[in-house]
Amino acid sequence: MPEAIKRFVRAVDAVNRFVGHIVMFGVFAMIAILLYSSLMKTVSIPPLWTLEMAQFAMVAYYMLGGGYSMQMGSHVRMDLFYSEWTPKRRASVDAFTVLFLIFYLCLLLYGGFSSTSYALEYGERSYSAWRPFMAPIKIIMCIGVALMLLQVIATFFKNLAEARGEPIA
C-alpha cells in the first residue's frame, strides 16, 4: 500500500480512538441526567428537559462511538461461514461488502447535511414542551456519520492490504 494510504489509516484510527475514549464517558452523563430526573420525581415534578436531554446524550454516545466500534471490531457480524475462511478470504470478502456500507453512509451523510442545514436555516425546534433547538444534535449526528465513514474507508484499505498479504499495522 502507498505510504499516503497508510498515513490516512493511522490518522483515522487515532482520531476515532480519541473520540471513542472521550465518548465512553457519555454514559455517565446520561446516567446523571436520569438520576437527577428520578430524584426530582420523588421530591417534586421532574424538569421538562431531562428525558429529551438523556435521549440527546444517548444519540451522541451512539453516533460518535460508531467509528471506534468499527475500529475495534465490536459490530455484529453474521458468522455462518466466515469463521471457517482463511484470513485472506475474509479480508477479500470484507473489502467487497464494506463498499455497500460506504454507499449507505454516504447517503446517510447527504441526508444528514440536508436536515442539518434546514435546522440551522429555520431554527428548527423539537415538538416537546421543552422545545430545544435541533441543530446541535443534528450536527453531532453528522459528525458521527462522517467519522464512521472515514473509519469504514480506512477499514476498506486495511482489508485490501490484508487480502494482498501486506497488512497495515
Image (cartoon, rainbow, N blue to C red):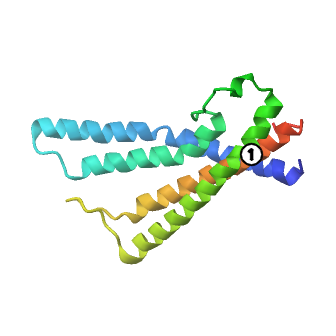
Q: Is residue 114 above or below residue 55?
A: below
Q: What is the x, y in percent for residue 61?
A: 46, 44
For the C terminus, which image quadrant? top right
Q: Which residue occupies the foreground of this view, 49 or 55? A: 55
Q: Which residue occupies the foreground of this view, 74 or 6? A: 74
- Residue 91: image quadrant is top right
Q: Which residue occupies the foreground of this view, 42 or 126? A: 126
Q: Identify the residue shown where x is 89% and y is 47%.
A: 1
Outermost residue, top direction?
84
Label 1 environment density (alpha carbons within 10 Å; few <14, some 14–19, many ≥20): some
Q: What is the x, y in percent for residue 158?
A: 78, 42
- Residue 77: image quadrant is top right
Residue pointed to by mark 1? 96
Could you tell me the amino acid type at mark 1? Phe
Asked whether, in this view, residue 77 is left or right of residue 14, the answer is left
Q: What is the x, y in percent for residue 27?
A: 42, 37
Secondary element at image label 1:
helix
Q: Identify the residue shown where x is 85% and y is 54%.
A: 4
Outermost residue, bottom direction?
121
Asked whether, in this view, residue 64 is left or right of residue 72, the answer is left
Q: What is the x, y in percent for residue 24?
A: 50, 38
Q: Identify the residue shown where x is 25% and y is 62%.
A: 127
